[in-house]
Amino acid sequence: MSEPYFLKPVFHEKIWGGTKLHDDFNYDIPSDHTGECWAISAHPHGPATVENGPYAGMTLDRVWAEHRDVFGDAKGDVFPLLTKILDASEDLSVQVHPDDAYAAEHEHELGKTECWYVIAAEPGATMIYGHHAKTREQLAKWINNGEWNKLLRRVPVKPGDFLYVPSGTIHAVGKGIMVLETQQSSDTTYRLYDWDRVDKTTGQKRELHLQQSIDTTNVPHHDPDLDITTTQVGDATVTKYVQSPFFGVWQWRLTNGQATFNRGTAPYTLVSVLDGEGSIVVDGQDYPLSKGVHFILPFDVKQWTLKGDLQIIASEPGAKA
């Protein structure tokens, strides 16, 4: 019988983390400095565990390695996507991620293009998104001289905003913001500024990667030209945020209704419930859904029906995944 595969997330403590993953999503978090929920992950730094079906108890990386038919015999050595929820109780470090070519040569893993759906943001919250340098020489000068007010570009954000962050984009999630992040499955981050803070555990400042940041940053910065569109599927409002070579990301929003979806060309779909309650019907079986639930619709699920009041972010691998 075809069925969705529900996943048990992995949590990571961070210097900038807080308690909202427990307060807002009722997760059992390890401490009051929990910054990241790796919700759908096959990365070796935190693979999620399948909770149901024939692969119950197996980590997602193992399912990918041993049962590739679940994913439509998709190619690639590693599961290409990673879904996280981030709770920024404080500003994250200012950072940049390499593209696939640089990461393969220097880090022996995928590059990291990502995107953020803003779940919550305190009034006045801002992201660092891009920079003001016109040349790489100017970028290097401002970074090496610590001229952050000249370099960094801040943008205000509110709940419901979406930002696409290609590799090479200087960025930082700001204090008081919670996001769902869809990204390539990479844990490579080049940190160029960390607000001069000291890690309470080590008593040291965290490592910076200034030369790697200068090498990999896109200069000058250009905001991506997103074609965000909205359509209707049954009672669901479907918002397409991005269709990139690495992933496509959508919001499915359902209010006291029902919607039936059919599989497109992608071999599998990643699904995260951000709010509400309802159910998904697959192959005649009804599975309850609630806020904070994450699952994969494998290749053999060709059709599914959502019911209830649900806010969902879904993603699928792109052509380069």
Image (cartoon, rainbow, N blue to C red):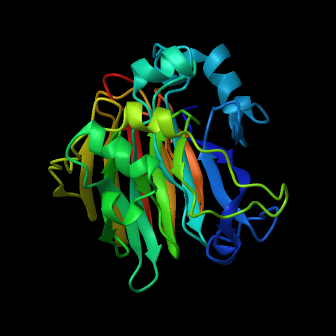
Q: Residue at x 28, y 45 (%)?
A: 138
Most foreground residue, 188 or 22: 188
Q: Position of residue 136 (x, y in %)?
A: 28, 37
Q: Residue at x 48, y 34 (%)?
A: 211
Q: Position of residue 27 (x, y in %)?
A: 72, 65
Q: Residue at x 57, y 22 (%)?
A: 107
**In the image, 156: left or right of 210?**
left
Indicate whether 188 appears above or below 313.
above
**In the image, 268: left or right of 231?**
right
Outermost residue toward the bottom in this view: 123
Does the rendering let one see residue 257?
no
Q: Position of residue 110 (x, y in %)?
A: 50, 25
Does the rendering let one see residue 275?
yes
Number of marks = 0
Indicate whether 60 appears above or below 164.
above
Q: Position of residue 43 (x, y in %)?
A: 64, 32
**In the image, 195: left or right of 139?**
right
Indicate whether 74 appears above or below 222.
above
Residue 106's quadrant in the figure? top right
